[in-house]
Image (spheres, rainbow, N blue to C red):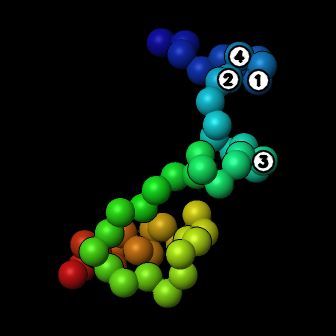
Amino acid sequence: MDVIPLDATLIKGSHGSINTPAEFHPVLITDQKLNNSNVQATEIHDLIWKALKG
């Protein structure tokens, strides 16, 4: 199946968008206490791993 276009103009969505207003940012819902209200994308793996290890 050839489902990934080679022409970048055909790719739609917000993946990788850096100028998105804060009200459209992703939401992280957790019962873990976070040190910061703004979590960087690079921190998500560790937060999920910590929650799974419990």
Instruction: Point out residue 4 in the picture as x, y percentages from the top left corner.
Output: 59, 20
Nearer to us of marks 3 and 1 is 3
Whether tag 2 and tag 1 are in contact, CB under 8 A, the answer is yes
- The crowd level at tag 4 (other Cα within 10 Å; few <14, some 14-19, many 20+) is few
Q: CA distance from mark 4 to mark 1?
A: 5 Å
Whether tag 4 and tag 1 are in contact, CB under 8 A, the answer is yes
Identity, as a three-letter code, of the amino acid under mark 3 = Asn
| Lower position in the chain sequence, tag 3 or tag 4 | 4
Identity, as a three-letter code, of the amino acid under mark 2 = Ile
Q: CA distance from mark 2 to mark 1?
A: 5 Å
Residue 10, numbered circle: 4
Q: CA distance from mark 4 to mark 2?
A: 4 Å
Compared across the picture, whether 30 is left or right of 39 comes to left
Q: Secondary structure at mark 2?
A: loop
Identity, as a three-letter code, of the amino acid under mark 1 = Ala
In the current view of this chain or complex, which residue is farthest to the left? 54
Nearer to us of marks 3 and 4 is 3
Whether tag 4 and tag 2 are in contact, CB under 8 A, the answer is yes
Q: Which residue is mark 3?
A: 19
The quarter of the picture where the C terminus appears is bottom left
Instruction: From the viewer's side, name the closer residue of 38 and 3.
Output: 38
Residue 8, numbered circle: 1
- The crowd level at tag 2 (other Cα within 10 Å; few <14, some 14-19, many 20+) is few
